[in-house]
Image (cartoon, helix red, strand yellow):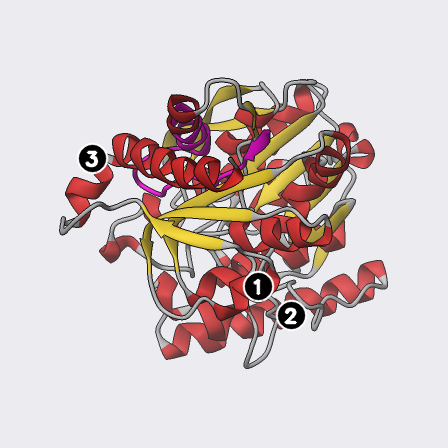
Amino acid sequence: MKVLIAPDSFKGSMDALSVAQAIEKGILKVSPETDTVILPMADGGEGTMINLVQATEGHVVDVQSVDPLNRSIKSKYGITGDGKTAIIELATSSGIDLLKDDELNPMITTTYGTGLLIKDALAQGIKDFIICLGGSATNDAGVGLLQALGYQFLDENGLPLELGGQYINRLATIDERKVMPEVKDANFEIACDVTNPFIGANGASYIFGAQKGATKEMIKSLDNGLEHFANIVEKQKSMSIHYIEGAGAAGGTAGGMLAFLNAELKRGIELVVDFVKFRDLLKQEQIDLIITGEGKIDGQTAGGKVISGICQLAKENDIPTIALGGSVEGELSELYTQGLTAAFSITNGPMNLNDAMTNSAYLIERQAEQVFRTLIRNIK
């Protein structure tokens, strides 16, 4: 029997590789002869970088960068095992979790730090990028990111704009003469699971501004700034980013990247599935069973999480799929429709969240063992 073990991380507790190894350990306790294949997965959100690094036997690069308030910090990005692709999570340098609540202010936060990570990878000869946009503290249209790569955003006096969303209204022209030459040969796949346009009532500022610290007045100003930016882009580059689906991701960073880089938006799970060649693996390896999992399984899991994507592909190939979760809650009918066979919580009795997270490796291993004992019994 060949079992593909392809979980996401259990957020705050274990990375995807550790989860997979715990599942494998439980399986092999029951059936040492079982052939297991481990493939850490991700959905394009937090943890995607380390999961893809582990899945491809790559490595992590430590870099000096800046946080959303342009303060020096140590940051990192991943390079895949073949040395060809950099995986960068915007949240690592430009994320909301890097700031205290009283520091949140999208008028002044910047994506410059994320641009420094891209710049470092370009300097190392990397040409292919996966950029994960979740968790931003910014609303600067990706201008900071682009400034780090050499793009000059100038006001009517020909002076460079300062960092932060509040200055975009002053943009008069964009000078690309000092852009790193490596940029033109680079390709960017953007993991983006939001559908919000660049501007308007459903755009970046109005939908996400408040959670980043913006008042109603700030939100209106920021949206005006993004509209002004989009108008300049359309005038200078003959490209309208105003209402592109997903362009509002990360405070408009997706739109800015689409306008100035060789970039393409993809749903996170689809990007990861394609990157790790998941479909080819299912066809070539003759998988009999898939065991996946993530920290919480509920009704929202069907909306683009790892388990959802795996179930749909497994169903296409008529492969049963079992999911393990730190908790399993609510109505899962959509997941069953997508191809899930069954879901099991790893908790084995009443316990608080801290206890479950502390003992997650043991609990995952134990539940995987119990599930596999049932399966082996039925198979025999």
How far apart are the two marked residues, 1 and 3, measured between alpha carbons?
Answer: 32 Å
How far apart are the two marked residues, 2 and 1, measured between alpha carbons?
Answer: 22 Å
Q: Quadrant of residue 120?
A: top right
Tell which tag, 1 or 3, sits nearer the viewer: 3
Where residue 220 appears, as percent x and y from the top left, is 48, 78
Q: Which one is nearer the viewer's eye here, 302 or 251?
A: 302
The disc at residue 358 is 3
Q: Is residue 170 shown to the viewer in this render?
A: no
Up the image or down, 219 lies above or below 154; here it is: below
Up the image or down, 92 lies above or below 26; here it is: below
Q: Amino acid at mark 3?
A: Thr
Q: Quadrant of the N terminus?
A: top right
Up the image or down, 181 lies above or below 356; here it is: above
Tell which tag, 3 or 2, sits nearer the viewer: 3
Sequence-first tag of 3 and 2: 2
Instruction: Name the residue beneath numbered marker 1.
Output: 194
Sequence-first tag of 2 and 1: 1
Labels 3 and 2 touching (C-beta < 8 A): no
What is the secondary structure assignment of the residue under circle 3?
helix
Where residue 321 appears, as percent x and y from the top left, is 55, 48
Instruction: Name the residue beneath numbered marker 2.
Output: 228
The disc at residue 48 is none
Q: Amino acid at mark 1?
A: Val
Seen as rendered, the residue at the extreme front is 380
Question: Would you say residue 378 sits in the magenta stretch?
Answer: no
Q: Is residue 264 shown to the viewer in this render?
A: yes
Where residue 244 appears, as percent x and y from the top left, is 71, 68
How far apart are the two marked residues, 3 and 2, measured between alpha carbons?
Answer: 49 Å
What is the secondary structure assignment of the residue under circle 2?
helix
Where residue 89 appears, as percent x and y from the top left, is 52, 40
Magenta range is 1-25
